[in-house]
Image (spheres, grey):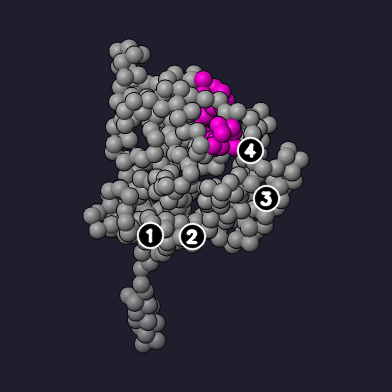
Amino acid sequence: MKKLLVCLAALSIVACKKEEPKPKDYATFSGKIENKNSDSLFVYQGRDFKRTIKVNEDGTFTDTLKVKSGVYGLYDGKEQTNIFLANDMDLKMTLDTKVFKESIIISGKGAEKTNFLIEKLKFEEDLVDIEALKSLDQAGLETKIKSLETEMLAFYDKNATIDSTLIAESKAQVAPMLNGLKGYVLGGIKLKQELPAGTVSPTFDNYENYKGGTVSLSDLKGKYVYIDVWATWCGPCIGEIPSLQSLEKDYEGKNIAFVSISTDDGRGYRAGSKEASFNLAKEGWKKMITEKQMSGIQLFSDKAFQSDFVTGYKINSIPRFILIDPNGNIVNADAPRPSYSKIKDYFSSFGI
C-alpha cells in the first residue's frame, strides 16, 4: 500500500506540473503612432537586416521579426531612434510624432534595454552642443572632449545593470565617437578662421529661381540671409527641411531672407548622357520643391559644387548653412542647422 501511495503521489506531481513555454524564435513588435509621418516603419541594422513594417490608417502596427540579438535603427519617414531586439521579446511602442523623442513609450518583455537606448540618445543630445563646441579654440575643445568622455562613462556605469554586453559596447564606442566629433568640430573652427565674421561674403549671381527669373545675393542686401546649401540626393539635407519650413514661418516678415541653393548636378539620375542626367536632376529639384511644399527662395546653382559661391565657402559636404549680414558680410560660414535646439536664441543674438 505504501509503495502504491508513493507511485500515485509521483504520478500526481507529473500530471500537475505545468510545462514551461518554449522561447519564441522571433520578436514581436507592435504599437500605435499618433500623427504618423508615413505608412510604414523601417527597422534596420546596417546592411545585415532591413524590414519594412506597415502602419495602418489608424496608426497601429504589428509584426514579427526573426533577429540576431542587438541594437537596431527605427525610422518613421522623418525621425529615427534605436531599439534593442532579440528573439522572444514582445515590444509595444506608442509615440506622437509631433513630440517624437519626448513621447516614446516602450513596454512589454525586453523593454528595459530599448528604454535605456532611448534615454542614452536623449542624454547624449543634451550633453553635446556642437555649436557651442565650434565657438571654442583647439585647447578649449580638447578640455571639453575629455569632460564629455568622463560624463558619458559615468552615465554608463550608472546603468550597468541593464545589460553587461550592451553597456560594454556603449563604453567602447565613446572614444571613437568623440574622436569623430572632435575632427568635425575642428573642421568648423578652421573654417571660421579662414572665413572670419565681418569679411565680405563670397557671392552668387543670377541663380535660377524656382518661381521664375533669377536671384543674386546683392538683391537681398539690407536683410540677413540664411542660406541652406543642399541637394535632392542628400538625406541629411532633406531631414532638415521640416525644421527650415518651421523657421521660415516663424520669421515671416522679419529682417531675414531664407535661401536654399541646390547643388544638384545629375547624381542619382541615370540617362544616356551627362547633360540628360543634369536635366533630370533639375526636374527632380522642381518636383521635390512642389511635393514637400518648400518655401523660402529656392535657387539652382550654376555649376553645382564647382560654383564660385560653393567653392568660395569651401563646401565639400552638405548640408551647409551660412548666415550673411545685411551689408553682405559673413556672420557665420558654418551656421547652426535649422534643427538646432537653440537656433532662435542664435538669431536673437543678432537682433533678428
Q: Circle 1: is it few (<14), some (14-19), or many (20+) Cα within 10 Å? A: many
- In reply to whether residue 174 is colored magenta, the answer given is no
Residue 119, placed above or below residue 67: below
Q: Where is mark 3, residue-wise?
A: 148
Q: Quadrant of residue 9?
A: bottom left
Residue drawn 42% across and 56% down?
100
Q: Is residue 351 left or right of residue 252?
A: right
Q: Whole-Å distance between the Cαs marked 4 and 2? A: 30 Å
- In reply to whether residue 329 is colored magenta, the answer given is yes
Q: Quadrant of residue 4?
A: bottom left
Q: Which residues are magenta?
A: 308-332
For marks 4 and 2, the one nearer the N-term is 2
Outermost residue on the right side: it is 139
Q: Where is mark 1, residue-wise?
A: 95
Q: Where is mark 4, residue-wise?
A: 185
| Of the two numbered discs 1 and 2 in the rendering, the one whose residue sits closer to the viewer | 1
Q: Amino acid at mark 4?
A: Val
Q: Whole-Å distance between the Cαs marked 2 and 3? A: 22 Å
Q: Position of residue 2 (x, y in %)?
A: 40, 86
Q: Where is mark 2, residue-wise?
A: 115
Q: Circle 2: is it few (<14), some (14-19), or many (20+) Cα within 10 Å? A: some
Is disc 3 placed on a helix, strand or loop? helix
| Of the two numbered discs 4 and 3 in the rendering, the one whose residue sits closer to the viewer | 4
